[in-house]
Amino acid sequence: MGRVYNFSAGPAVLPEDVLKEAAEEMLDYKGTGMSVMEMSHRSKAFEEIINGAEADLRELMNIPDNYKVLFLQGGASQQFAMIPMNLMKNRVADYIITGQWAKKAASEAEKYGKVNRIASSADKTFSYIPDCSDLPVSEDADYVYICENNTIYGTKFQELPNTKGKLLVSDVSSCFLSEPVDVSKYGILYGGVQKNIGPAGTVIVIIREDLITEDVLPGTPTMLTYKTHADAKSLYNTPPAYGIYICGKVFKWIKSMGGLSAMKERNEKKAALLYDFLDQSKLFKGTVEKKDRSLMNVPFVTGDVDLDAKFVKEAKEAGLENLKGHRSVGGMRASIYNAMPYEGVEALVAFMKKFEEENL
């Protein structure tokens, strides 16, 4: 069987060029006679890999000089604790709840201080982004936290909340590098790479330098202190070396595609194809308010659980994989990250049309 169109929410599709390049270098990376998987993270060859990856990411995102880039482990979920441990000086933080991951982050932060949930879209199953132009931001809040793109529910902040001068912390796991971003608007933005950038096991944290201090909550482990990793240039302990290597290749691939503006254009084109079909379909419907739709994750339903299951099963047989919605919401979800080609979305829409004709 050849390659399928993989609509998984993560671990997710990677660019074919990157996979081929990695395959070619699997046994012998650039004449070292070994794989990157086997190489010392203290070696000259790996130093070039990690430094090159950081330099390319800085260029792609136009990261200001007063921000550090950290390649860490523990996924986005470990950041749910690391953020309050490092930032909750007043032991107060404001969270905007737009889905499962913001919800989990807020309850984790409650172990370290007072969490104010200042806005939420739970009332309509997280199918929209609440108005964040004039929120009751707490005067003593250390930061305001958002999950910028909600993988499960398919919503995206089209504009950032007005934090009234407070630090903004954002989980960008599922929209990382999908469009240009103004890094200076954030104190921290971070994401697990397994959706849009690389294999599972690496998380990238972009953090403003003044937030990296020794003044962390008592009892914070050495490994969960940003300063530990910033001072050691992400090499305090053995980093997820192979993951970082693949991320570096993906950064180069994005640069070769024309950078983040070109990515955004490409992603808008793919998303429009699918959303336009959903908007005129008699069988399928999208579940998100139009103004808040994500370019990356597109949830949809038929309204009939059995029909949904039939669709997922037949789609799989047609080489369209991982279209089942998250277990918490059911239905279907197509994740159409950077590496999903336009042809993949075309194939999905063609299949949906055929399925609609046969099942209406």
Image (cartoon, rainbow, N blue to C red):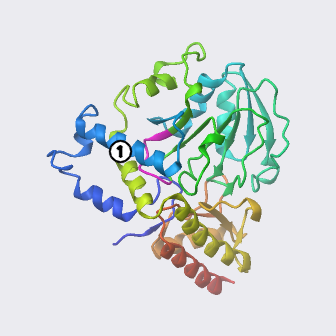
Q: Residue visible at 23% across and 40% down?
A: 38
Relative placement, left or right, of 87 versus 23 is right
The magenta span reads 196-204
Examine the image and state in which quarter residue 114 appears. top right
83 or 303, which is in the foreground?
83
Check residue 198 for magenta coloring: yes
Quick one: quadrant of the C terminus?
Answer: bottom right
Q: Residue visible at 46% across and 27% down?
A: 230
- Residue 156 in the image: state x and y as whole percent: 68, 54
Relative placement, left or right, of 68 versus 286 is left
- Residue 178 in the image: state x and y as whole percent: 55, 57
Placement of 113 over or under 193, stated as above or below: above
95 or 178, which is in the foreground?
178
257 or 355, which is in the foreground?
257
Amino acid type, callout 1: Gly
Residue 289 appears in the figure:
no
Which residue is the site of mark 1? 52
Quick one: quadrant of the N terminus?
Answer: bottom left
Residue 240 appears in the figure:
yes
Check residue 266 for magenta coloring: no
Tag 1 secondary structure: helix
Which residue is outermost to the front? 65
- Residue 76 in the image: state x and y as whole percent: 54, 39
From the image, give the main secondary structure of the stretch colored magenta: loop
Relative placement, left or right, of 173 versus 156 is left
Q: Residue visible at 34% across and 46% down?
A: 245
Examine the image and state in which quarter residue 25 appears. bottom left
Q: Residue visible at 85% across and 42% down?
A: 134
- Residue 227 in the image: state x and y as whole percent: 49, 23
Relative placement, left or right, of 120 versus 15 is right
Label 1 crowd (10 A; few <14 / some 14-19 / many >=20):
some
Which residue is outermost to the bottom? 357
